[in-house]
Image: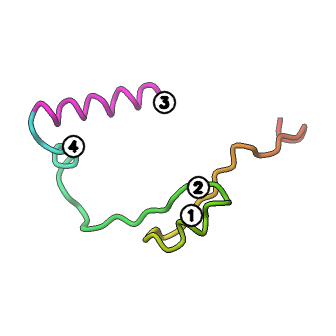
Amino acid sequence: MAISGVDLALWDLMGRALGQPVYRLLGGETKKTIPCYATTHPDQVSHWKNSGFIGVKIAAPWALRTAAWA
């Protein structure tokens, strides 16, 4: 994850130095819109339902750990 953070920071720095958005440095626009989904807590699903996202992914950092999974 650290390498990804450095990679993104370097692209951002290059874009700022050249006065260009990063998407243009990577080849330009390929689509007019990009469908996406929201990652949220189960209690917040109804909030995102009518917000223009194509779906919702439930974040589950509390997933069960059992001896069979270890």
For image coordinates 64% across by 57% down, the residue present is 58
Q: Which residue is mark 2?
A: 40
Magenta residues, as a range?
1-17
Q: Amino acid at mark 4?
A: Val
Label 1 sits on a secondary structure element that is strand
Q: Separation of disc 1 and disc 3 at Cα? A: 24 Å
The Cα atoms of the two marked residues, 2 and 4, are separated by: 27 Å
Mark 2 or 4: in front is: 2
* Residue type at numbered disc 3: Met
Q: Earlier in the sequence, mark 3 or mark 4?
A: 3
Closest to the camera, between mark 1 and mark 4, is 1
Give, as a three-letter code, the residue at label 2.
Answer: Thr
Q: Say which residue label 4 marks.
A: 22
The quarter holding residue 7 reads top left
How far across and down, in percent of the image, does residue 54 sit? 48, 70
Single out the mark in the foreground, 1 or 3: 1
Colour convention of the picture: rainbow
Label 1, residues with CA under 10 Å away: few <14, some 14-19, many ≥20 = some
Q: CA distance from mark 2 to mark 3?
A: 21 Å
Give the residue at the far bottom of this rendering.
Answer: 50
Residue 2 position, x and y percent, is 45, 25
- Identify the residue under disc 1: 56
Q: Quickly name the residue at label 3.
A: 1
Q: Closer to the N terminus: mark 2 or mark 1?
A: 2
The span from disc 3 to disc 4 (Cα, nearest Å) is 20 Å
